[in-house]
Amino acid sequence: MSKISIKQFNQIIQSELPWAADTGMTLESIEEGKAVMRLPYHHKSIRPGGTISGPHMMSLSDACMFAVVLSLLGEVKLAVTTSFNINFLRKPLETDLIAIGTIIKMGKRLAVIEVSVYSDEEIVSHATGTYSIPPTGKFES
């Protein structure tokens, strides 16, 4: 069972992640070690060449990683990205993007996560990242 609810995470987006809130990004489902997020299609997310921009896919992937980490820890807002890698696999369609994130390894100080982003059920990017977990006793925001 997740240690954070959909409602709690979406509230974090609204109150503390303005870059995510501005895009309409939302958490759709969460369970222990897994999260699914949606980035609604918007014409402002298009780059030259008629594709959704890489930074939009990157921000969706990173937010999804954060949700996966919080699903395991609860509201530990000081968990932060320490590394991030993304591979763009194909041009997304002009439609909502869906990110599915899962934990690869959860340690005491580091969490390794992967996220696949889909456009109309076809994978368009794959990201991996590492999050730093604050030491015990420093979980409070």
Image (cartoon, rainbow, N blue to C red):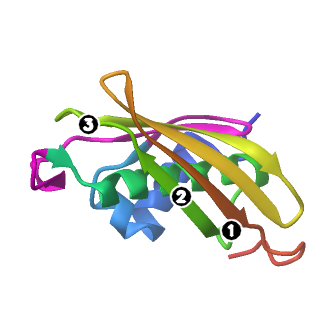
Determine the CA span between mark 2 and mark 1. 18 Å
Element type at mark 3: loop
Instruction: Look at the numbered discs 2 and 3 and tell me whether their residues touch, using CB distance below 8 Å.
Output: no
Image coordinates of residue 90 in percent, x first then y, are: 31, 36
Query: Does the segment drawn in magenta span residue 30?
Result: yes
> Which residue position holds label 3?
92
Quadrant in which the N terminus appears? top right
Quadrant in which the C terminus appears? bottom right
Instruction: Look at the numbered discs 2 and 1 and tell me whether their residues touch, using CB distance below 8 Å.
Output: no
Range shown magenta = 27-50
Report the side of 11 relative to 2 (left or right).
Answer: left
Q: Quadrant of residue 38?
A: top left
> Which residue position holds label 2?
85
Determine the CA span between mark 1 and mark 3. 30 Å
Marker disc for residue 69? none
Q: Which residue: 43% across, 67% down? A: 17
Q: Amino acid at mark 1?
A: Ala
Q: Which residue: 38% across, 39% down? A: 89
